[in-house]
Image: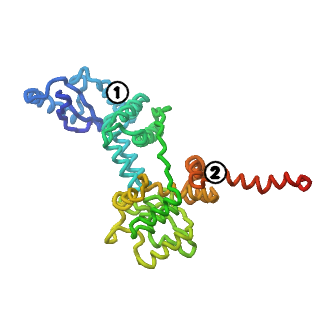
Amino acid sequence: MQSLSMASLRTKNGKLFVDFRVDGIRYKEYLGIPDNGENKKKLKSLLKRLDAEITLGTFDYFKYFPNGKKAASFNAQQERRQSGAATPMTFEAFAEVWFFEKKVEWRDSYSDITRVTLKKHLLPWFRGRLLDEFSKADTLSFRAFLTELPSKGGQKLSASRVNHSLTPLRIILVEAADRLGFKNPWINIKRFKQKRPAVEPFTLQEVQAIIEHVRPDFKTYYLVRFFTGLRSSEVDGLQWKYVDFDRRQILVREALVRGKLTDTNTGGSSREIDMSQIVYESLHDRKRKSGNKLFSARYGQPLNNRYLTQRVWYPQFGHLGLNLHRSYQTRHTAATLWLAAGENPEWIARQMDHADTKMLFEVYSRNVPNHTRKDGSAFERLLKSEFVSVQSNPKEAN
């Protein structure tokens, strides 16, 4: 028996269309007649009959909509049911199953973002579509649609935002094709190239000026950010139980995301940060003065990074005569200062939570000469101390 779903009249561009569901699949048929009281009254009895026939399982698509675009698809669906073949799932139905199964693996923040992407973009666009009817053209059409959407600022969505919406679509289609046995429609569809966020590290002199002039109750906070490479969420979620003074290490175990502490083991970012002397002394002094709370807002409330950026971070730049930098540049600064100091790249990669040293050399190394002002000087010293001595003593070299 076909499942009951009340049919309704809806309007688009001043014209009426019928919106109804059969077996959980949504159908929309456009009537091409004006939306007015008289037409709605005439169609009222038609909707009642349509609902009754859907309930009884006698609904004939061609009888009501002989030129309907979905008529052939509907009949094929009913023939599959009558033959005992598996009923294809709609995108919406499978997406909900997929989300329910996967959310247990995600942080709350990622789950929330994915839910918004589904609700705002994917489900409205693909609602009622059968998965085995998907084609490469459908995914390309959706991608093109995303590129025309305006952002909050009125401009078109960035490549990053478009790619972010395409990611769950790709995963859903690949998973559905594997489970339900149809051809994967996600074939050779590439992500848009994204601009790498600008890396604008501070010089050591600028860091010193910022630490000296920042609001006193946040000196230690920013000193830790500059000299540990912690992410904003990681330093905001830092607690005294994760500061090991004996081993001189900061244990990254939780992060503060949207006001909630989240286990970093879930995201694979748990690690140990070695404390430099200045970080060790600053935290030790803060522990002696502040007691139980490490970093918090007034009255012990969790830090709000947006508020902190606007009220503590940005106000000092005008006074210091510096260009505005995102607070995330403190993390980039740590990496470049470590490289400039000659630290082992593998050690730096571990501190930064990088899988390997590739990013260090691709992203940060070009900024190192700006800090040392002696690019190539180490090699020059090597030549002077070794090569010159060999030239001056050729017999000893042999």
Helix or strand or loop: what does disc 1 sit on? helix
Q: Quick one: label 1 or label 2, which is nearer the N terminus?
A: 1
Label 2 crowding class (10 Å Cα cut-off): few <14, some 14-19, many 20+? few
Q: Is residue 119 above or below residue 7?
A: below
- Image coords of residue 225 (percent x, y): 47, 62
Query: Looking at the picture, which amino acid does disc 2 mark?
Result: Asp
Q: Nearer the viewer, residue 397 or 190?
A: 397
**Percent position (x, y) of residue 250?**
52, 68
Colour convention of the picture: rainbow
Residue occupying the point 43% across, 56% down: 327
Q: Which residue is mark 1?
A: 76
Q: Which residue is mark 2?
A: 375
Asked if residue 310 is positioned above or below residue 130 in the image, the reply reads: below
Q: Is residue 319 left or right of residue 35?
A: right
The N terminus: image quadrant = top left
Kind of residue at disc 1: Ala
Instruction: Give the answer, above or below, for where 108 lies relative to 79.
Output: below
